[in-house]
Image: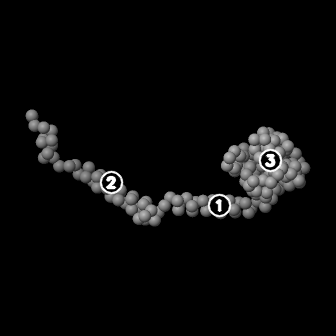
Amino acid sequence: MDEPIGKMEAHNKVPRGFLVLLFGLIAFGVYYIAAYTPGISGWSQYKVLSKEMEADKAKAAAGAAKMTGNPYERDEKAVAEGQVIYAGKCAECHGKDLKGADGPSLVGPLKFSEQDPGKYESIAKGRPGGMPPFETELGRDRIWKVLAYVDSVRE
């Protein structure tokens, strides 16, 4: 029993399961490299991402095409309701008189869009640099009412 462990195990074969696992991992590694290396397969996450972005742009354009204008334009009741919503949700950043505070002025030229669908999207989806999205909080009709109020002041 004084033999070193290496000599005691020298006569044992490598377990078959271990060999299957080893060669399986090697085969998977070769497949993975061949399938996901852009120089070999041509696949790239950037291509997938650009396709997804194009699909999103087309979807947004289709959604914007559906929205032709504000359904509450010149509706006095909706404008009054929009003024109340504006005072509670928007005045803190855009000012009570819409001339800006922390956020930009809404009485001058708008940065993202002068058209109703673009203005709606700015409120609903938010904008980079501080404008949070309000779609889930306000909903479609209340956003249009806020826009009716803002447009009534801008005229």
Give x and y (percent) for residue 85: 81, 43
Q: Secondary structure at mark 3?
A: loop
Give x and y (percent) for residue 97: 85, 43
Q: Quadrant of residue 28?
A: bottom left
Q: Is residue 90 visible?
A: no
Quickly name the residue at label 1: 57
Q: Are marks 2 and 1 in contact (CB under 8 Å)?
A: no
Q: CA distance from mark 1 to mark 3?
A: 28 Å
Which badge, 2 or 3, is on the more N-terminal residue?
A: 2
Q: Secondary structure at mark 1?
A: helix
Q: CA distance from mark 2 to mark 3?
A: 61 Å
Q: Are marks 1 and 3 in contact (CB under 8 Å)?
A: no
Label number found at residue 25 = 2
Mark 2 residue type? Leu
Give x and y (percent) for residue 43: 47, 63
Mark 3 residue type? Ser
Give x and y (percent) for residue 8: 13, 41
Mark 2 residue crowding within 10 angstroms, few (<14) / some (14–19) / many (20+): few
Which badge, 2 or 1, is on the more N-terminal residue?
A: 2
Q: Is residue 88 left or right of residue 43?
A: right
